């Protein structure tokens, strides 16, 4: 049996769960044992992932559950909306499924977020399991219990904090990941270095080629270390009252890019990568970090094949979109900025400084 790494999320009130990381986990019976008992399981996936993994997962779950249903949604960030959420709920209600029903989110971050949100609201809460099949989902979105859908006025503005029962991160599913999706996932891996672990940033720089080549041992370490950092942060601040906000490094501008261009035009990781470059620039302008750090981060993101120049939406449009960000407070736009390598904090940034940064990077 292939080696499996386990990272434990520890929350108040003994609401703990495991993130299991390794190759071949979809086919290991142990992955699906010890979950809440129910008559029915429902796999929620999309029309890209379903042909690849849905029947394999269904076969494994049929050894545990009497009945295993399948809900297939359209693929893409543009479908992370009320209509797709309703399709999940329509199935649950149409089949008169009870509150013991277990949902399984098989896919990337969009599927994980929507399935988790459906689990949070159906009968005021049913259990669910994350089965992330993209690098971005394995290192970030499947971990920590943030669930949501998008609104035309803002990304992830409608949702709930709702934790899964388990996360099964099978590294073999990354073999089928398109190159662009793999690179987008690396943005969330890179993020963890500047905010929490300077040594990990050096490791990423040294191992970027192996990550892009999908070396399983290197990918496994990247997923495990990313999950360890996120588990530590979420365990201290589940509902983002303070510390957890650091996980949003690059996301303030990133979310504005996604909403401004239309969901799906840029992948989430691409927008976050560009957002990190601009947030690093703001860190320098506020005197927190030297220019060398900005260039170092930009160079790494460029090597990863990710964008470093924001689209030209106009300064006023950027400011308008960023005011809808969940970190905004009393109209002030707040950014996660790097205070020292491996340390980040939340800072209110004047509009004029934001415009300076956007202008310097050719955005207006």
Image (tube, grey):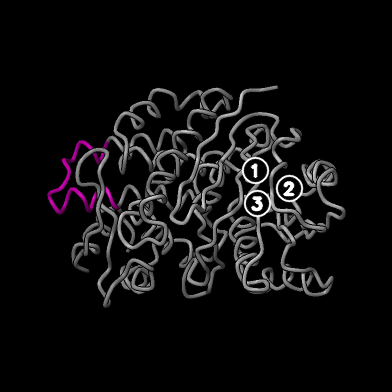
Q: Position of residue 104 (x, y in %)?
A: 70, 53
Q: Earlier in the sequence, mark 2 or mark 3?
A: 2
**Residue 35 covered by magenta stretch:** no
Quarter assignment of residue 228: top left
**Residue at numbered disc 3:** 129
Mark 1 and mark 2 residues within 8 Å of each other at the beta carbon: yes
**Residue at numbered disc 1:** 133
Report the mark closest to the observer, 2 or 3: 3
Give left or right: position of 326 versus 50: left
Q: Earlier in the sequence, mark 1 or mark 2?
A: 2
Direction bottom: furthest residue: 330
Identify the mark at residue 49; answer none if there is no mark: 2
Q: Secondary structure at mark 1?
A: loop
Instruction: Give the magenta-colored segment's residue range.
Output: 279-295
Q: Position of residue 23 (x, y in %)?
A: 66, 29
Mark 2 and mark 3 residues within 8 Å of each other at the beta carbon: no
């Amino acid at each position: 049996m292939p080696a499996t790494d386990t990272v434990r999320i520890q929350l108040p009130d003994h609401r703990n769960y495991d993130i299991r990381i390794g190759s071949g986990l979809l086919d290991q019976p142990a992955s699906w044992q010890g979950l809440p008992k129910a008559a029915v399981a429902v796999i929620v996936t999309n029309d890209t992932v379903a042909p690849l993994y849905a029947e394999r997962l269904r076969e494994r779950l049929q050894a545990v559950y009497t009945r295993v249903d399948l809900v297939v949604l359209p693929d893409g960030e543009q479908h992370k909306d009320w209509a797709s959420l309703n399709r999940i709920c329509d199935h649950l209600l149409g089949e008169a499924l009870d509150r013991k029903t277990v949902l399984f989110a098989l896919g990337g971050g969009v599927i994980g977020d929507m399935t988790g949100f459906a689990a949070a609201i159906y009968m005021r809460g049913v259990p669910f399991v994350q089965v992330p099949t993209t690098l971005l989902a394995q290192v970030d979105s499947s971990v920590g219990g943030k669930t949501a859908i998008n609104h035309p006025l803002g990304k992830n503005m409608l949702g709930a904090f709702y934790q899964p029962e388990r996360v099964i991160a099978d590294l073999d599913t990354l073999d089928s990941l398109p190159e662009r999706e793999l690179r987008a996932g690396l943005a969330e891996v890179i993020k963890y270095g500047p905010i929490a672990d300077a040594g990990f940033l050096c490791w990423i720089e040294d191992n970027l080629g192996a990550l892009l080549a999908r070396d399983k041992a290197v990918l496994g370490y990247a997923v495990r270390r990313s999950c360890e950092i996120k588990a530590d942060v979420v365990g201290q601040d589940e509902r983002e009252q303070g510390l957890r906000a650091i996980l949003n490094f690059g996301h303030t501008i990133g979310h504005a890019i996604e909403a401004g261009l239309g969901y799906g035009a840029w992948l989430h990781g691409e927008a976050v990568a560009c957002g990190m470059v601009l947030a690093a620039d703001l860190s320098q302008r506020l005197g927190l970090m030297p220019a060398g750090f900005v260039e170092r981060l930009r160079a790494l993101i460029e090597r990863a094949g990710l964008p470093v120049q924001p689209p030209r939406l106009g300064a006023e449009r950027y400011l308008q979109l960023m005011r809808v960000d969940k970190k905004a407070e009393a109209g002030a736009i707040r950014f996660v900025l790097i205070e020292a390598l491996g340390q980040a904090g939340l800072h209110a940034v004047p509009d004029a400084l934001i415009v300076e940064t956007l202008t310097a990077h050719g955005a207006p």
